[in-house]
Image (cartoon, rainbow, N blue to C red):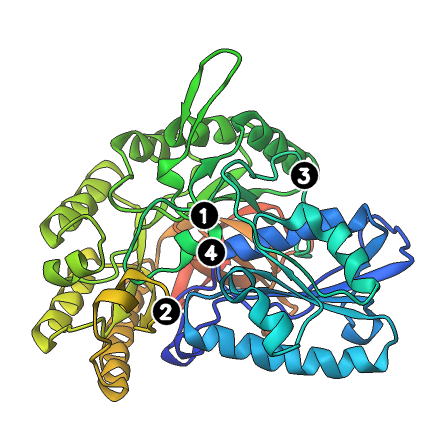
């Protein structure tokens, strides 16, 4: 779901994904109006953009890669770090220049930043015409109509029921092999540093059978990998109101895996407190459920974890890591880390480095702490670590993680892995790029008989910290 082993430079940008205008025409349809959309932040935002695309298609809007051709310019935003919001503001300035060149064009902000800043974007900064929160996308047609009449349109109401379960997303990613499926929305975990509970609301799980139907439809259309998305997928729980059947996340994983043996299943994100042995057993027992778990730690020190309200301490987290490796010996584990959280000492930072060595993560998402208004940490704690110290600690985390990732990848040399081909390598159209079950990127020379969506066995011959390189097994 993510590009692997981000560098310090990438992480300092704080934008995990930025597929600016990565859209395509669908099914040869022609549209009288066009929209252009950029998505920032987590995978959930990209999934939401596909829901928005579906809603807009029913209103006669088709996607375009060219901002200048768009009647509607949208940005799906992230509020998790200050730099993400700064980037969006810069993009909005550019959008407004384009808007002035096309009569009647509208600019809209979607997602978490829309919910957090609400009318400020409309009234104080006058950067946009439409502001839509994550639970209000169904209202887009009404908001567009209102904005077209010169009104400034806003709907950021949060919902306890909305899951968009009945909307078939328009897939904006052009590779035709991998896709996201949103299985739940919102978050009930009140981590002290996080704005998500305030911008996306409370947890609610989607009807399990609509998820299975979406997975089946994707497989029938040629997709060969789905990633089940949620702020905390392990807390997924759905009760069938007709039969009182209860579906846990472990049960859902198995249901999706049984759509077809050739449909790979991934998931993100897991909160350490909620992942169960049943989930691990499902990964162990189903070959097509990938041997990869993203298990955010955030810190390697128990006092800091308590300040973060993570609800576990270091020994508990290490026991969870041990259990994963016990049940699934060849599982890859990745993580998230925040450097320089409020009052973190140098010794506590060293505890984080020690955890990275202990857990042997294959990759991590690494950031320095960015205070977010409205969070518990903002209200209760002083952001007292100097920026220079935060950046230095982050640099040390990234350096160590890259060393461990390199060793992990070098240990794969000589091994054979089943690889799902995703498309061409970025550097050469004579090579394919694919991924192993452990979510490691593999580059290898093409064969004419192969195409994206095929599985192939590859022997690993060399590696760096981000990528494996190999040849097709004869």
Quadrant in which residue 173 is drawn: bottom right
Say the numbered circle drawn on residue 199.
Answer: 4
The alpha-carbon separation of the residues under discs 2 and 1 comes to 16 Å
Which residue extends farthest bottom? 388
Residue 225 or 44: which is nearer the viewer? Answer: 44
The alpha-carbon separation of the residues under discs 1 and 3 comes to 20 Å
Does residue 360 sit above or below 252 in this rendering? below
Which residue position is annotated with label 2? 372
Which residue position is annotated with label 3? 167
Q: Are the two marked residues, 4 and 1, in contact with CB atoms closer than 8 angstroms?
A: yes
**Disc on the earlier residue, 2 or 3:** 3
The image shows residue 212 at horizontal and vertical percentages of 57, 29
Q: How busy is the neighbourhood of tag 2: few (under 14 within 10 Å), some, or many (20 plus)?
A: some
The image shows residue 403 at horizontal and vertical percentages of 26, 72
Mark closer to the observer (4, 3): 4
The alpha-carbon separation of the residues under discs 4 and 2 comes to 12 Å
Which residue position is annotated with label 1? 201
The image shows residue 96 at horizontal and vertical percentages of 72, 80
Q: Secondary structure at mark 4?
A: helix
Judge left or right: residue 460 versus residue 99: left
């Amino acid at each position: 779901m993510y590009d692997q082993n981000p560098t310090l430079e990438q992480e300092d940008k704080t934008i995990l994904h930025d597929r600016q205008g990565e859209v395509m025409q669908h099914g040869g349809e022609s549209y009288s109006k066009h929209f252009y959309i950029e998505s920032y932040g987590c995978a959930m935002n990209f999934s939401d953009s596909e829901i928005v695309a579906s809603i807009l298609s029913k209103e006669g809007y088709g996607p375009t890669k060219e901002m200048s051709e768009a009647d509607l310019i949208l940005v799906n935003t992230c509020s998790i770090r200050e730099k993400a919001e700064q980037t969006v503001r810069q993009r909005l300035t550019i959008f407004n220049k384009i808007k002035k060149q096309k009569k009647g064009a509208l600019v809209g902000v979607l997602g978490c930043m829309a919910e957090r800043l609400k009318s400020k974007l409309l009234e104080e900064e006058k950067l946009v015409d439409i502001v839509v929160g994550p639970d209000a996308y169904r209202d887009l047609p009404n908001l567009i109509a209102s904005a077209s009449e010169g009104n400034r349109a806003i709907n950021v109401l949060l919902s306890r029921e909305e899951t968009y379960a009945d909307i078939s997303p328009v897939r904006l990613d052009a590779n035709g092999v991998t896709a996201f499926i949103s299985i739940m929305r919102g978050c009930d975990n009140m981590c002290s540093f996080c704005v998500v509970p305030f911008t996306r609301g409370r947890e609610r799980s989607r009807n399990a059978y609509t998820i299975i139907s979406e997975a089946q439809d994707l497989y029938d259309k040629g997709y060969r990998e789905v990633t089940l998305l949620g702020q905390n997928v392990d807390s997924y729980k759905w009760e069938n109101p007709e039969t009182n059947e209860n579906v846990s996340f472990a049960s859902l994983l198995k249901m999706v895996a049984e759509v077809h043996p050739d449909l790979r299943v991934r998931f993100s994100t897991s909160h350490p407190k909620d992942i169960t042995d049943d989930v691990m057993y499902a990964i162990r027992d189903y070959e097509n459920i990938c041997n990869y778990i993203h298990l955010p730690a955030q810190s390697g020190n128990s006092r800091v974890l308590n300040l973060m309200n993570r609800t576990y301490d270091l020994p508990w987290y290490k026991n969870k890591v041990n259990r994963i490796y016990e049940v699934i010996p060849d599982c890859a584990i990745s993580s998230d880390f925040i450097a320089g959280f409020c009052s973190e000492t140098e010794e506590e930072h060293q505890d984080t480095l020690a955890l990275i060595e202990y857990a042997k993560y294959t990759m991590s998402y690494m950031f320095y702490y960015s205070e977010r208004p409205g969070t518990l940490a903002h209200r209760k704690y002083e952001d007292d670590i100097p920026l220079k110290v935060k950046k230095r600690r982050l640099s040390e985390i990234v350096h160590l993680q890259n060393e461990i990732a390199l060793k992990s990848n070098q240990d794969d040399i000589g091994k054979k892995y089943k690889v799902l081909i995703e498309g061409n390598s970025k550097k050469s159209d004579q090579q394919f790029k694919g991924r192993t079950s452990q979510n490691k990127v593999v580059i290898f020379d093409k064969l004419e008989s192969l195409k994206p969506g095929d599985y192939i066995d590859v022997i690993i011959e060399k590696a760096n910290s981000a990528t494996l390189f190999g040849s097709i097994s004869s």
